[in-house]
Amino acid sequence: MSSATQTQTEQVTALRFHKRGDLRLEQLDALPCGPDDVRVKVAYSGICGTDVTEYVGGPIFPPQEGHFNPYTGVSLPIVMGHEFSGVICEVGSNVNHLKVDQTVVISPAYDHRHYGTEFCEPCKNERFNICDASATIGLNAPGGGFCNKTVVKAMNCIPLPPNVSLKAAALIEPLAIARHCITTSGFKKGQSVLICGAGPIGLAILLLLRVLGAYKVIVTEVLDSRIGQARSFGADVVMNPIKAEETLGMSAAEAVLGHVKGGVDIAYDCIGFQSTLDLSIASVRPAGMIFNVAIHKKPLSLNLNDLSMKEKKLMGGICFFREDFEVVIGMLAEGNLNAEQMITSIIPLSNIIKGGFEELLHNREAHVKILIKP
């Protein structure tokens, strides 16, 4: 069906962020489907920690009230949701590689390819994840997935094989972030790893490392429920670093070194606290890698001698490439990756504020990923 036949009066149900603490489930006019767009009937969408942070502390990524994003033109209120899958129900006149009824996952990233403007240096080098003008669907770009239907750029749609469920597909975006971190860190099969933090991204890294052939994976976590989740997801060792002295008679770093002589090859800090940075540095072998996954709320202290004296490396990563989506989709299609174990609740769109956002605010430790089904 072409955009010309789309009924102009069609209404969609969507969750919009208006301002801090103000989310509203509203009836809106359907967006037009332009020549390079597709209309997607949303199947499942996941609530991300970033979404909850915007709810209680935003706008952070969305433009401030009365302003608009200079690249995407988005202004408040904005339809949220950037982890979602669905079925194409309309294609624009210029779209030839996608078709109606095709199942897709949405890559939410925007860069200079979307704007038709001169590429920045990262984009010229195909490092689109660190574009100078990056934006994200559902935060500061149009087409958010907390709705029953949305319109996105065709280039943001990645087709799914028939044996990859739409439910699992809604988890591909956080898994793509995890895969990007693993690849960027230089991980190789047979290496040992420490993961600080068993939140959604930490557990996603754990799941992928099991598929990719990590020799030993140690996870540190302070919440009992997430300690249990890390064990069920396949961690070889799970410990509470705060209680290590009490229960093990040694520091957390000493405990890690007790499990992997000389230290782990790579430590992924998915928390971003001073304590987790210090633990990561202390737990890595000489010439090993400390990889920052977390988005930090405040600056941390770092003694560079701790790196230099043992030639340890410290780096970070952000977002993903399309390749990361495609590799994760391949793992799901081959049956090697059980992503659906990340799902702890599925709720209707009508209950997204109370059963989703408020639930994560007040009962975060009980969940890995809440999915919304319109």
Image: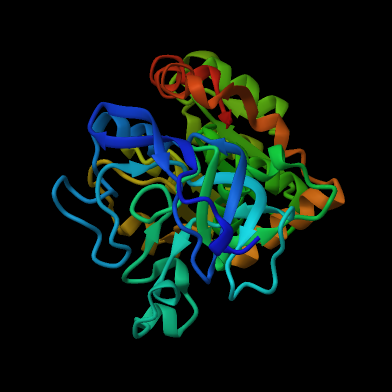
Q: Does residue 183 lie above or below 354 as drawn?
A: below
x%, y% of residue 200?
Answer: 54, 35
Q: Residue visible at 40% across and 18% down?
A: 358
x%, y% of residue 213?
Answer: 77, 51
Does 257 sit left or right of 102 as displayed? left
Q: Does residue 161 lie above or below 204 as drawn?
A: below
Res 113 visible: yes
**Quarter placement of the N terminus:** bottom right
Q: Residue visible at 43% across and 72% down?
A: 114
Q: Does residue 257 lie above or below 182 as drawn?
A: above
Query: Which one is nearer the viewer's eye here, 36 or 57?
Result: 36
Q: Quadrant of residue 323?
A: bottom right
Res 321 visible: no
Q: Does residue 203 lie above or below 122 as drawn?
A: above
x%, y% of residue 24?
Answer: 34, 28
Does 311 sit left or right of 259 as displayed? left
Query: Which one is nearer the viewer's eye here, 12 or 25?
Result: 12
Does 214 sit left or right of 187 as displayed? right
Query: Which one is nearer the viewer's eye here, 298 or 246?
Result: 298
**Quarter placement of the C terminus:** top right
The residue positioned farthest toward the left in the image shown: 66
Query: Which one is nearer the viewer's eye here, 200 or 48?
Result: 48
Q: Residue visible at 57% across and 44% down?
A: 84
Colouring method of the image: rainbow
x%, y% of residue 214?
Answer: 72, 49
Q: Quadrant of residue 117?
A: bottom left
Q: How many labels were placed on the picture?
A: 0
Q: Quadrant of residue 4?
A: bottom right
Q: Residue visible at 70% across and 37% down?
A: 167
